Amino acid sequence: MEASSNDRLLQQDEVKEMLGLADSTLEQWRLKGKGPKFVKLGRAVRYRLSDVQHYISSLPCFGSTTEADHQREAQV
């Protein structure tokens, strides 16, 4: 059975590069149930490319930093 290229398993280093985040941020997100879904293979953590892409596409888009700031303030 051949896996789709979108379901290729990524290591944390690849995901942190894609998202521009630190290792510690991804680790905290996993503890808090935030961020992209992940897979545990024994002790190893992997991310499906499709899950990372879905996470990115689910984030809101903004036309300006002012709009983003107003959105963030409304959530607080």
Image (spheres, helix red, strand yellow):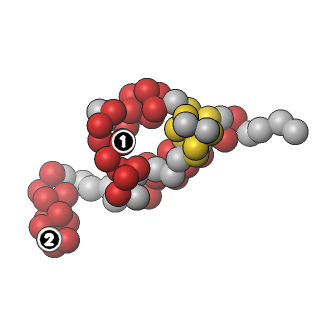
**Amino acid residing under circle 2:** Val
Residue corresponding to mark 1: 26
**Amino acid residing under circle 1:** Leu
Residue 49 rendering spot, x and y as whole percentages: 57, 40
Residue 50 badge: none
Residue 40 rendering spot, x and y as whole percentages: 58, 43
Pick whichever, 66 or 54, lies toward us.
54
Q: Residue at x 65, y 35 (%)?
A: 8
Mark 1 vs mark 2: in front: 1
Q: Residue at x 61, y 38 (%)?
A: 42
Q: Quadrant of the C terminus?
A: bottom left
Q: Earlier in the sequence, mark 1 or mark 2?
A: 1
Q: CA distance from mark 1 to mark 2?
A: 22 Å
Pick whichever, 39 or 35, lies toward us.
39
Q: Is residue 48 visible?
A: yes
Q: Residue at x 36, y 42 (%)?
A: 27
Which class describes the residues within 10 Å of circle 2: few (<14), some (14-19), or many (20+)? few
Q: Is residue 17 left or right of residue 1?
A: left
Residue corresponding to mark 2: 76
Q: Is residue 29 left or right of residue 73?
A: right
> With respect to residue 59, does 10 lie above or below?
above
Q: How many numbered marks, from 0 up?
A: 2
Q: Residue furthest front?
A: 43
